[in-house]
Amino acid sequence: SGLTRVRRYLLGRWHYTYVGLAGATLFFCLSVTPSLLPRGAVLQGLISGVLTAIGYGLGVLVVWTAASLTTRTLPRPGRTAWWSLAGVAGVAIVGFLYLGSGWQRDIHRLMGIDPPARPGYVVVLLVAVVVAVALVGLFRLLRKGARALARLLGRWVPARAAAVIAGVVVVVLTLGVLNGVVIDGFFAVTDRSFKAANGEDKPDSEEPGSALKSGGPGSLVTWASL
């Protein structure tokens, strides 16, 4: 029926591998461990999302490598294995979110910043899921593009050479876009936000009276320029 075809299409489109999800869970938990500087919920969510996608990719790579080194078909996880992974992942994610929120509150206090509310740390999980799904989907799209280009080049060159050339082209174009558009845009936005924050005066900031401090009497820089 039409409903069955739609269900199969969605399951196929949103299918994730068992080992990949295990790697994604591990890397998400590691991403919320203590850092040297305080992180807001959105920034932490972005970092966690990128690392979660990397963890998933490494899990897929492990399975692919194992399958290429053996002639036997790798065992597929059953229903019990999937439920076990879901249970362990759920407990681990909730536990590390709770611990992570506490670690961030401690870091904020050490830096003299008001600690964020603990319930707001749920935003980290929401942002991380969106970013990770988007990145995994992007790389799947790039893989399809590489395969399509390989089929096109296969009309004139051997199949193996076509696959290598297509892979190199896609990787080079992707790195160029990431470096020239995404990364540059990210740093431009962060630079503007940090400049605005650095330009604000704190209520308890006063012009120093010591000649040993920047902006004080005899200093090469004025207090206003700071």
Image (tube, rainbow, N blue to C red):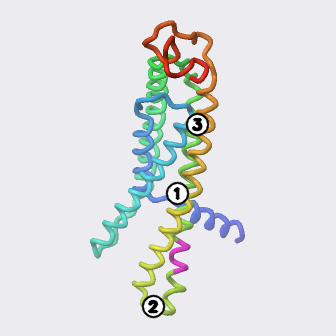
Image location (x, y in percent) of residue 217: 51, 11
* Amino acid type of the residue that numbered disc 3 sits on in the rendered structure: Val
Left or right: 223 as drawn, with respect to 2: left
- In space, the residues marked 3 and 1 are separated at their CA atoms by 22 Å
- Counting every numbered tag in the picture gives 3
Q: Inspect the magenta stretch and tell me whether residue 203 lies in it.
A: no
Q: Amino acid at mark 1?
A: Asn
Residue holding disc 3: 42
| Image mark for residue 157 | 2
Q: Earlier in the sequence, mark 3 or mark 2?
A: 3
Q: Is residue 75 above or below residue 185?
A: below
Residue 18, quarter of the rendered image: bottom left
User: Of residues 30 and 37, which is closer to you in this image?
Assistant: 37
Between 84 and 51, the one nearer to me in the picture = 51
Residue 197: x %, y % from top left: 61, 28
| SS under mark 1 | helix
